Each structure stands twice: as C-alpha cells, then as structure tokens.
Amino acid sequence: MNNKHPSPNKKPVSSAVKAFLNDADRFLPDTINQNPARLVFALDATASREQAWDHACEIQTDMFSAVHEIGSLAVQVCYYRGFRQFHYSQWSTKAKPLQDFMADVNCQGGHTQIEKVLRHALNSQKTQQLKAVVFVGDAVEEHPDTLCDLAGRMGLLNIPLFIFQEGQDTHVSQVFRQLANLSGGIYAPFNLSSREQLKNLLSAVAVFATGGKSAAQALSKTRPDLLPFLKQLR
C-alpha cells in the first residue's frame, strides 16, 4: 500500500474543503492528546464520486466539532481512485496536514477498491487501535465474499464499519449492509440533498469513536432523530 501522495497537476483547495479545515482548527484542542480516539475516514474517489467529493470533505467538520467536549479525535483520510491507486494521510488532530493531503485530490475513473480499505484498517490495527472506520461510496465491483470475510475479521477485532451509501442501487445496499453488520457497525443511505442528515450521522459516529456506546446513547437522548441509527450499535 502506498501512502506517498502524488503531486502532479496540483489544484487549489476548494472553498468547501477550506471551510472544513478552518472550522476544524477552531474546534480541535491546541494540545494534542497522547491517546486520541482514532477514526479512519475512507472515500471512493472514482469518477462517479466527483460531484460529491467536496461535499464529503466539508461534512467532516462536524465530526470534529461533535467531540470537542468529550475528548480528542485523530483522523486518517484514505481514498482509492483510478487504476489501483490507494492513498492515505498521516494521522491528524489538526487541519493543516489534511489540507496538504487533500489539496491535489481529483477523482479519477476506475473500479472500486473497498478490499484495500478493509485490509488497510486491519493492518493499521496492528500498531494503532482503531475505534471506527467510516466509508462513503456508491458502488461495489468486487466479490462480496472477500469483502465479507474482511469485515468479519474487523468485527472480531472490534473495528466497526460505518458505511454510508450514496444512491439507491439495491445490490450495493445489500453488500454494504452485510459488511456493516459483520463488523458490528451501521449502514445508512444518503443523497446529496440530505446533507444535514449525513452531517448528523457522522457526528454520531465521532461521538461513538471518542466516548464509546455510552456516549452515543447519551447523544440519542438529546437527539432523538438519531435513535434509529444508534440503536443498531451492538
């Protein structure tokens, strides 16, 4: 796996990404927690996701802001695109490293590589304890049995998958539901018109990653709209 991000054709950071990074700096603590909760945020960056890329980046702001009173959150962004390209950032509790990583990301046509996301999470667990993996995508072009086996291994290691599907493809939703269930995580659909819903769901995931199931349950008392989502937690 490659964590060296390519730099050719570097483009300016979009306004949505800039807004996310600026807000993240306001919410994150100045002193880095030596043991922050670690969350992998994985994105499909193939051509079909181009219109949603800035949208997905922007809503990460709410994951950081939702946990600033509970503890520290360290995020690693990873994505796949093009022909066998898989990249991931360094862990970060501040915005600048993410800005450097995301500045030259552009979506490229290619097949899904969800298997690489899951294997990356399992490999990361050997040295860093993960609290959750978030995946945002709209397609599955790999063998479901392989993905389900990896999701099951994640479940054994208590690494829940929170999968958010853009679109309404029935085959995709069936596979995503299986993966989330096997890992002990949650599946939820969304579309670009339901930004507020996805923002709230991602905030709930961040609260769970930082404070555990008890914190998520406490959140549901003040946010009853999230109860159907959070009740899926095992």
Image: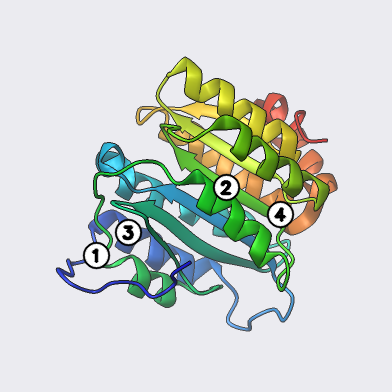
Label 4, secondary structure: give it.
helix
Q: Is residue 31 left or right of residue 167?
A: right
Per the model, the C-alpha gap separating discs 3 and 1 is 6 Å
Look at 72% across and 57% down and name the residue there: 131
Q: Tag 4: residue type?
A: Ala
Residue sitting nearer the eye, 89 or 157: 157
Q: Earlier in the sequence, mark 1 or mark 4?
A: 1
Look at 52% across and 35% down and name the residue there: 164
Q: Disc 2 designates what residue?
A: 134
Residue sitting nearer the eye, 39 or 217: 39
Q: Earlier in the sequence, mark 4 or mark 3?
A: 3
Q: Disc 1 designates what residue?
A: 13
Q: Earlier in the sequence, mark 1 or mark 2?
A: 1
Q: Are marks 1 and 2 in contact (CB under 8 Å)?
A: no
Q: Earlier in the sequence, mark 3 or mark 2?
A: 3
Per the model, the C-alpha gap separating discs 4 and 3 is 23 Å
Snapshot quadrant of residue 71: bottom right
Q: Disc 4 designates what residue?
A: 209
Percent x, y of residue 100: 34, 75
Residue 17 marker:
3
Compared with residue 196, is residue 53 higher up or lower down, i.e. above or below?
Answer: below
Q: Earlier in the sequence, mark 4 or mark 2?
A: 2
Q: Is residue 1 left or right of residue 48?
A: right
* In this view, the mark in front (1 or 2): 2
Q: Tag 3: residue type?
A: Val
> Which quadrant of the figure contains the C terminus?
top right
Label 1, secondary structure: give it.
loop
| Local crowd size for mark 4, using a 10 Å CA cut-off: few (<14), some (14–19), many (≥20) | many
Q: Tag 2: residue type?
A: Val
Snapshot quadrant of residue 119: bottom right
